Amino acid sequence: MNKRHFLHTALLAAAAPAIPLARAAALPADGPTLLTLSGALTRPNRGALDPALDQLMGKHGLAFDQARSFTFADLAALPAIEIRPTLEYDARVHALRGPLLATVLEHAGAPTGEATTLALRAFDGYTVELDAADLRRLSPIIATHLDGAPLPLGGLGPLWAVHDADRIPELAARPLAERFAQCPWGLYSVHVGAAGGR
């Protein structure tokens, strides 16, 4: 064996952060959960909120018996559309891409009838309430990309529930700073309510 190659490999291995084998095996192949849908769902893929481990959701008052979690890869695998609104932050048109919120709801088996309500929650606790009529009227997307690049954590991402305000007459008529109040960036939770459901 080449001694120099062996020493180089050993040094790299020693410098790499140690991850316990059991923990490494438990990491999902397609990344961590970025979005959790809870409430009235027929296709959950995870169990109840764990108050010890689901700290942020617990602090924001969420409670659920089952939920549907989505990784970045899960969301990227759904059909995406692109919208091009003028954003309030720099008054410039930007390309935002991601699946429709309605598509994500459908994938989780969430109802979208007239009795459906949605609570979209951002990391900072900012919460937007939508109903079925809002969902149809606004057609929000769960944006994963801005101008071709993934939305960064610490910026507007990694997920942003956003609509194309320039093409919704009632919003386009408002001042730019008032067009995106129903668009939480840093989105991480959507709770689905329905008549007779939680």
Image (spheres, rainbow, N blue to C red):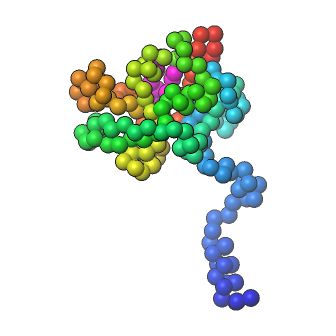
Q: Relative to 182, is 115 above or below?
A: above
Q: Quadrant of residue 115?
A: top right
Q: Residue furthest right?
A: 22
On whether residue 124 falls in the magenta region, the answer is yes
- Residue 178 visible within the image: no
Pick the residue in front: 42 or 81: 81
Q: Residue at x 73, y 59 (%)?
A: 20
Q: Relative to 148, is 159 above or below?
A: above
Pick the residue in front: 185 or 16: 185
* Residue 135 position within the rendered picture, expressed as x and y whole percent measured from the top left: 45, 21
Which residues are drawn in magenta? 118-131
Q: Is residue 165 left or right of residue 45?
A: left
Pick the quarter of the image with the C terminus: top right
Q: Residue at x 46, y 43 (%)?
A: 144
On whether residue 141 falls in the magenta region, the answer is no
Q: Relative to 27, is 58 above or below?
A: above
Pick the quarter of the image with the N terminus: bottom right
* Residue 137 position within the rendered picture, expressed as x and y whole percent measured from the top left: 40, 20
- Residue 140 visible within the image: yes
Q: Is residue 40 left or right of residue 79?
A: right
Q: Residue at x 36, y 27 (%)?
A: 181
Q: How many marks?
A: 0
* Residue 129 position within the rendered picture, expressed as x and y whole percent measured from the top left: 46, 20
Pick the residue in front: 58 or 148: 148
* Residue 9 position within the rendered picture, expressed as x and y whole percent measured from the top left: 66, 79
Q: Relative to 112, is 60 above or below?
A: below
Q: Main secondary structure of the magenta part?
A: strand
Q: Residue at x 67, y 24 (%)?
A: 42
